[in-house]
Each structure stands twice: as C-alpha cells, then as structure tokens.
Image (cartoon, rainbow, N blue to C red):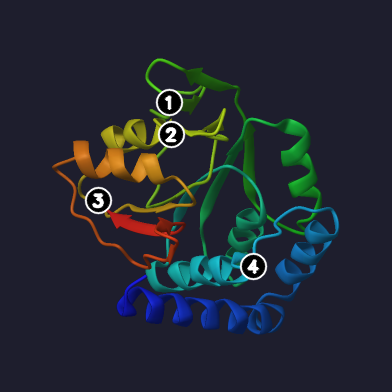
C-alpha cells in the first residue's frame, strides 16, 4: 500500500469511528435500529454509521423531491427521517422480499413511503439482476441502488434496472444516483453511458472497493 492510499485509509477509519459517535446524536432512531440489527448479526460492518451519515448529507445537499429506493433497509429509515424534517418528497421503496420489507416498515413510525415488492429476475448468461418491473411510470431525482441482491455464487452481478431508469430519465431534470456496493453496476454505467455527466460525490474506498458513489445525470 503506497503512502497516499495509507493516509486515505487512515482518514477513512477515523471518519468511521467518528460517525459511530455522531449517528446517535443526529439520527437516534436510526442508530437504535442499527444496534438492534447488530444484535441479530445484521449490518455488522464497521463503516455502516459512516455510510448512513453520508447518505443523510447527500439528501441535505441535493434536497430531492422524489426518491426511488431499490432495496429496503436502514436507508429507508434515513429517507423517512428526511420526510419527517418537513421535506416534501415522494418516496418509493422496492424490494424482492416481502417479509423483510414488512420488518423494515415496522421500524418506521409515521411515514408516507410507498412500498412495493417485485420478484427478482436473474440472467446468468448476462450476469445481471433486476426487478420484475419496467420502471416506465416512475421518475425520481434521487435513486438509491441497493437491490436486488446481486451476489450470486460469489459473483457480483450488474443491477440492470439502473439502465432502465436512465433510459426513462427526464433529461431536463438532474437525477442523482447512489450505489451501495454495486461495483460491477458502476463500471457498466461508466463504460456504456457516454451521455452521462458523472459527479463522484463521496467516493469511499475500502481495499479498493467503493461502497457509496454519487452520479448525476
């Protein structure tokens, strides 16, 4: 590891430790649920607090009025907290697992989130996953991509819904995309979408893996 990467990793680890202290102060409900998840052996990664605060900062910076969330979870609580601040925002949360999504919904108090469940479609030849939905009637200025589950037999499948949403995006409206551990998806977007203007809002690297990448259309 060269000096630059070593310094970057040290700074990142410091930010992760600091985020563990900050999350309970800024988003106590989210922090409480995270601890419950950890007791159940979920969300065990040390960087989760940092990632959630990064997402919270992105919402504060871009002030979206419509959000599509692919993959429900703690991020859904972040979006609900954003609504509770008095921000007018339409939110659609999509997942392939109804039982899991129902458990997420139970953690929320008052919210106006529209929950949807669609089956996951896997194409092993193309190494892609997507939801069984065409997304033609859905528009958003903020898209959070954390689903469907894309690790299949230790392979990182591409989430092809990203490209469908891009094809249907209103070119007169900026759309901000955030990818959570979707390495192959980000690479495919970069390789195949030459009409896009990229903005890497918070590239965070852990051993060369970006877990939160922002991109505007």
Residue 127 is drawn in which quadrant?
top left
Query: Would you say residue 169 is visible in this rendering?
Result: no
Q: Check contact, mark 4 vs mark 3: CB within 8 A.
A: no
Mark sitting earlier along the chain (4/2): 4
What residue does disc 4 label? Answer: 46
Towards the viewer: 24 or 185: 185
* Horizontal and vertical percent position of residue 62: 38, 67
Mark sitting earlier along the chain (1/3): 1
Q: Which mark is residue 128?
A: 1
Crowding around mark 3 (Cα neighbors within 10 Å: few <14, some 14 to 19, many 20+) is some
* Horizontal and vertical percent position of residue 148: 55, 34
Towards the viewer: 194 or 203: 203
Quadrant into which the N terminus falls: bottom left
Query: Would you say residue 6 is visible in this rendering?
Result: yes
Mark sitting earlier along the chain (3/2): 2
SS assignment at label 2: strand
The CA span between labels 1 and 3 is 22 Å
Q: Check contact, mark 4 vs mark 2: CB within 8 A.
A: no
At horizontal 60% and vertical 72% (from top left) the residue drawn is 85
SS assignment at label 3: loop
The CA span between labels 4 and 2 is 25 Å
Crowding around mark 2 (Cα neighbors within 10 Å: few <14, some 14 to 19, many 20+) is many
Mark sitting earlier along the chain (1/4): 4
What residue does disc 3 label? Answer: 217
Q: Which mark is residue 159?
A: 2
Camera-side mark, 1 or 4 = 4
The CA span between labels 2 and 1 is 6 Å
Q: How many marks?
A: 4
Q: Check contact, mark 2 vs mark 1: CB within 8 A.
A: yes
Q: Check contact, mark 1 vs mark 3: CB within 8 A.
A: no
């Amino acid at each position: 590891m060269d000096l630059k990467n070593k310094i970057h990793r040290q700074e990142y680890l410091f930010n992760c430790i600091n985020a563990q202290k900050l999350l309970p102060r800024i988003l106590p409900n989210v922090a409480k649920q995270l601890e419950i998840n950890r007791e159940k052996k979920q969300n065990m990664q040390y960087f989760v607090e940092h990632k959630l605060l990064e997402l919270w900062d992105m919402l504060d910076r871009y002030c979206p009025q419509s959000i599509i969330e692919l993959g429900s979870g703690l991020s859904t609580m972040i979006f609900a907290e954003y609504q509770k601040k008095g921000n007018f925002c339409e939110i659609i949360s999509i997942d392939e697992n109804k039982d899991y999504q129902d458990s997420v919904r139970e953690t929320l108090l008052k919210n106006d989130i529209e929950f949807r469940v669609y089956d996951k479609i896997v194409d092993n030849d193309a190494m892609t996953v997507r939801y069984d939905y065409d997304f033609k009637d859905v528009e958003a200025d903020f898209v959070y991509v954390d689903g469907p589950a894309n690790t299949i037999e230790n392979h990182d499948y591409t989430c092809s819904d990203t490209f469908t949403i891009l094809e249907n995006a209103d070119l007169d409206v900026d759309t901000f995309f955030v990818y959570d551990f979707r390495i192959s998806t980000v690479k495919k977007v970069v390789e195949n979408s030459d009409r896009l203007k990229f903005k890497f809002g918070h590239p965070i690297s852990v051993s060369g893996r970006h877990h939160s990448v922002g991109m505007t259309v």
